[in-house]
């Protein structure tokens, strides 16, 4: 799960910065994003299995698809919410594009990016548990489904608490990135 999430973040954050700052790129890619974004990540599962022929790689692919859109959209929105005076000030100080991006744009966008990462991670966690129910073999989703088939409700309740607890821990770990945001 973390691999699919990490790949999504490595692609979505730079792409979101680009789309948030370039209207031309945004206009060109927005139709594709709007068509692909609402597709359930679980709808990619059969296609992933058919193309990749490996359940582990398919899981990574499905998690990637689940995490990509929340990170991308939050990053684009974060860039658009940056006070234009910050970027104007960087220009007046003759900061190059790299300096403006890493010293002004990225720190100002980080709260939005962290929100996207938190949303994406919780979505990825939800999707992987659901995918394990469908594909089976291993994982908490598979366990819950087997316990349902055995009508073992107490085990299902314990599994739900564990799933929720892991989700909470994952969310808190990403929320710690918020500490990187300079105050003021």
Image: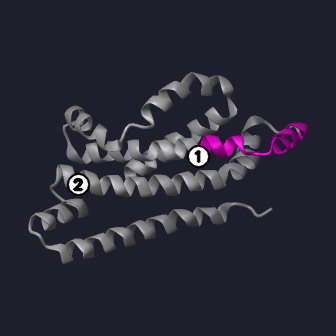
Classify the position of the C terminus by image quarter. Answer: bottom right
Sequence order check, earlier mark of 1 and 2: 1
In this image, 170 relative to 163: left or right?
A: right
In this image, 64 relative to 148: left or right?
A: right
Q: Where is residue 125 in the image (x, y as percent from the top left)?
A: 37, 57
Classify the position of the N terminus by image quarter. Answer: bottom left
Dominant SS of magenta comes to helix
Count residues near mark 1 (Cα–Cα under 10 Å), then give few for <14, some for 14-19, many for 20+: many
Identify the image quadrant of residue 20. Answer: top right
Rendered residue at 46%/43% (across/down): 68
Of the numbered discs in the image, which one, if any, rests on residue 74? 1
Rendered residue at 61%/28% (across/down): 26
Residue 123 magenta: no
Which span is picked out in magenta?
Answer: 74-93
Q: Where is residue 4 in the image (x, y as percent from the top left)?
A: 38, 48
Q: In this view, does 32 lie above or below 16?
A: above
Rendered residue at 68%/48% (across/down): 106
Q: Position of residue 151 (x, y in %)?
A: 11, 70
Which residue is outermost to the left?
150
- Label 1: which secondary element: helix
Q: Position of residue 160 (x, y in %)?
A: 30, 70
Rendered residue at 83%/45% (across/down): 86
Of the numbered discs in the image, which one, if any, rests on residue 132? 2
């Amino acid at each position: 799960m973390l691999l699919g999430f990490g790949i999504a973040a490595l692609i979505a954050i730079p792409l979101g910065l680009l789309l948030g700052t370039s209207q031309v790129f945004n206009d060109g890619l927005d139709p594709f994003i709007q068509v692909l974004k609402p597709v359930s990540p679980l709808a990619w599962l059969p296609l992933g299995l058919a193309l990749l022929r490996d359940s582990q790689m398919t899981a990574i692919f499905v998690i990637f698809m689940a995490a990509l859109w929340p990170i991308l959209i939050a990053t684009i929105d974060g860039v658009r919410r940056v006070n234009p005076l910050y970027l104007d000030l960087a220009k007046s100080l003759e900061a190059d594009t790299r300096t403006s991006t890493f010293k002004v744009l990225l720190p100002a966008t980080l709260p939005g990016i962290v929100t996207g990462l938190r949303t994406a991670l919780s979505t990825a966690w939800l999707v992987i548990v659901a995918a394990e129910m469908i594909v089976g073999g291993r994982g908490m989703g598979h366990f819950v489904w087997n316990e349902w088939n055995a009508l073992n409700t107490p085990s299902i309740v314990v599994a739900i608490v564990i799933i929720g607890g892991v989700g909470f821990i994952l969310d808190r770990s990403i929320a710690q990135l918020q500490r990187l945001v300079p105050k003021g």
